Amino acid sequence: MAERTLYEKYGGFSQVSKIVLSFYDTLLDNDEIGPFFDEVDMSRMVDHQTKFIASLLGGPASYTDKQLKQLHSHLDINDAHFDELEVVLRATLREHSMADEDVEAVVAEFAKRRPLIVG
Amino acid sequence: MTIEAINEQLLRAIGVGVALLDSRTLQFGFRNDTFDDWFSSENQPNQLQELFPDLDVGAMQTALTESGRYTSEIRFKKKRRTLIIALDFTSTNDDVLVLVCQNITRIKELESMIDSYSMMVERNTREIKREKEQVEKLLLNIMPRSVYEEYKTFGVVTPQLYNPVSVLMLDFVGFTEMVASQDPSVTVTELNDIYSAFDRIGEQFGCERIKTIGDAYITVAGLPDPTPDHAKAIANTAIRFVRYLTRRNLSHPHQWQCRIGLSSGSVVGSVVGIQKYVYDIFGPAVNLASRLQEFSEPMEISVQDEVANVLKDQFDLENIGARAIRGFGEQDVWRLSDSS
């Protein structure tokens, strides 16, 4: 049997959807990263965040490295932006009472993708 | 405080945007705090169309004359967030239009999220289905469908006795030498072609290929579903195997010569093994077919006495006399030839 993912541990979509929404709210209000989404359509933005959180937690979404790189290639994302998103992500997960070690596991997953996104 | 004052206070504080308009001029007469909060802008337009340039006023007025109500939806960006507000106009008797606005942004965001999620899940479901079909296909290659169904339902397969069935055992002449003298990969590729052809031939006559061990090929008629003419099916299959090889040898540099043995009897079929399971059959019919095969000259088919008696009327059979068969005593053995 495959190991239980964090996605399952934290209650599947019904719970993860709450994380997604609050992450979405925080991002839009964030003046460091928010501007990247100025011109992004709401449904695309929600779709993006749903897949983002789901894939980090081992849910039913996965981007290949190539896709991630390609999707972010037109954006001028620097290390500071990436750091900021890490802060926002960590805060959101904590807010939803995720255990510290699980938060760090998710953040570590996120950090692995830095070379694909920044540049 | 008067009742009117309380009412106004309530109207202002409520989480729903409320505005009153003159139904002819579409000028705002009253807007509550929530409304202003959502729609305030620098120039503060005081007319409906100026505030909502995208609103279809024509359609609104038609609907208002017909039913007294009109609903619509507007989207706009506040900072970088798209707000979606549902507008509900109701006309009253005294030329006043009541506009009630609800913030449905969250509902729309949730709808988008459900869309996104269901698309992911549906894609995953499709993938899982495809994988399942792959696994099923693989398992069906190593066991009959009915056995697979049993395995799928119960997780185990009960050994089952099939009686009577006919078994065909085929072995190639000089295979070991061929592997040694030729390029083994070519030999194996050819063997694969031949086995595939055998599978197709067997299928036509309702035979179930059980297994191949190196250059030995075993197929059975009458399993898993009983067939009354299993002997006939196996004889037809055997003749076609020889015919196929004969024709193939005409156009290929490598000559493949086989010996075939046919027998009838009972076998037990079961899945053997736990991690690396194979479906296999056991029983005297299997052993006898194997022994009989040894009596065949290249490209010949040896047939058990019992089977020959069933087939005699329809097939070209010749008694080659009694033979001592290891484990089975002395029995008459027959030679089956292709009469066409």
Image: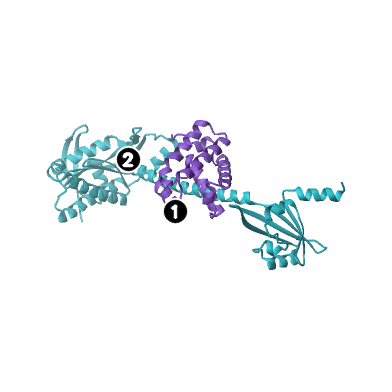
Chain colours: A purple, B cyan
**Which of the 4 quarters of the picture holds residue A114?**
top left
**Which of the 4 quarters of the picture holds residue B19?**
bottom right
Mark 1 chain = A
x and y, in percent, of residue B93 in the image = 82, 63
Residue A14 in sight from this viewpoint: yes
Q: What element carries label 2?
A: strand
Q: Is residue B57 above or below residue B281?
A: below
Nearer to us in this view, B113 or B203: B113
Q: In this view, does B67 lie above or below B226?
A: below
Q: Residue at x 70, y 65 (%)?
A: B60
Q: Residues within 10 Å of mark 2 (few under 14, many from 20)?
A: some
Q: From the image, tell me which residue sits under label 2.
A: B164
Q: Is residue B201 left or right of residue B253?
A: right
Q: How crowded is mark 1: few (under 14 residues within 10 Å), some or many (20 or more)?
A: few
Mark 2 chain = B
Quadrant (top left/top right/bottom left/bottom right) for the C terminus of chain B = bottom left
Q: Residue at x 50, y 36 (%)?
A: A6
Is the same chain shared between marks 2 and 1?
no
Q: What element carries label 1?
A: loop
Residue A74 is tagged as 1
Q: In this view, does B259 lie to the left or right of A83?
A: left
Residue A41 is tagged as none
Amino acid type, callout 2: Pro
Q: Which one is in front in this view, the residue at disc 2 or the one at disc 1?
A: 1
Between the residue at mark 2 and the residue at mark 1, the CA separation in whole angstroms equals 72 Å
